[in-house]
Image (cartoon, rainbow, N blue to C red):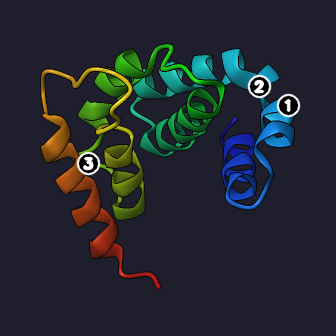
């Protein structure tokens, strides 16, 4: 599922919304299963990739679905994640469309996400 998520994320930035959603919406349930299994085994890279794709699908379909549950499951993986994965995980946290998790405010999550991305300096 990580390979599918990584491909879909690359395509997200250049594809039109409707064809992209039509192509990947059917994978939503499998992506969600892969996301939660990855959090259980501590696989931050798969968590970040599948979480990001699920967020994109949620955004384009107009719902948050289980975003709050995903944030709560992903948060403990941030500290030990490698830099790019850490930035991706932090980026899952500050969305306006659902409630903040108890562990971090939206503002602090947004600051951490910006800081993590800036730290990569991969222009």
Q: Position of residue 111 (x, y in %)?
A: 18, 55
Separation (CA) of disc 1 from disc 3: 35 Å
Separation (CA) of disc 2 from disc 3: 31 Å
Instruction: Tell me if mark 3 has few (under 14), some (14-19) or many (20+) residues whose alpha carbon lies within 10 angstroms of its own.
Output: few
Instruction: Kindly identify which residue carries mark 3.
Output: 80
Q: Quadrant of residue 67?
A: top left
> Count of labels shown?
3
Q: Position of residue 110 (x, y in %)?
A: 23, 49
Which tag, 1 or 3, sits closer to the chain's start?
1
**In the image, residue 77 above or below residue 62:** below
Q: In which quarter of the image is residue 20?
A: top right
Instruction: Kindly identify which residue carries mark 2.
Output: 25
Would you say 57 lies left or right of 43 here? Answer: right
Residue shown at the point (58%, 31%) measured from the top left: 54
Between circles 1 and 3, the one closer to the viewer is: 1
In this view, which residue lies farthest toward the bottom? 123
Would you say 70 lies left or right of 105 here? Answer: right
Instruction: Tell me if mark 1 has few (under 14), some (14-19) or many (20+) residues whose alpha carbon lies within 10 angstroms of its own.
Output: few
Instruction: Tell me if mark 2 has few (under 14), some (14-19) or many (20+) residues whose alpha carbon lies within 10 angstroms of its own.
Output: some
Question: Depth check: 30 or 63 in front?
Answer: 63
SS type, badge 2:
helix
Between circles 2 and 3, the one closer to the viewer is: 2
Separation (CA) of disc 1 from disc 2: 6 Å
Residue shown at the point (21%, 23%) measured from the top left: 101
SS type, badge 3:
loop
**In the image, residue 39 above or below residue 46:** above
SS type, badge 1:
helix
Q: Position of residue 55 (x, y in %)?
A: 53, 34
Q: Position of residue 72 (x, y in %)?
A: 29, 22
Quarter of the image with the N terminus is top right
Instruction: Kindly identify which residue carries mark 1.
Output: 22
């Amino acid at each position: 599922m990580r390979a599918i998520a990584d491909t879909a994320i690359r395509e997200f930035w250049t594809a039109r919304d409707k064809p992209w959603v039509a192509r990947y919406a059917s994978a939503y349930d499998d992506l969600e299963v892969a996301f939660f299994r990855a959090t259980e085994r501590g696989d931050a890279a798969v968590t970040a990739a599948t979480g990001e794709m699920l967020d994109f699908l949620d955004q384009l379909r107009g719902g948050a679905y289980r975003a709050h549950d995903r944030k709560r499951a992903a948060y403990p993986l941030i500290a030990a994640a490698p830099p790019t994965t850490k930035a991706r995980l932090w980026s899952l946290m500050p969305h306006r469309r659902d409630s903040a998790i108890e562990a971090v405010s939206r503002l602090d999550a947004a600051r951490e996400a910006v800081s993590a991305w800036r730290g990569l300096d991969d222009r």
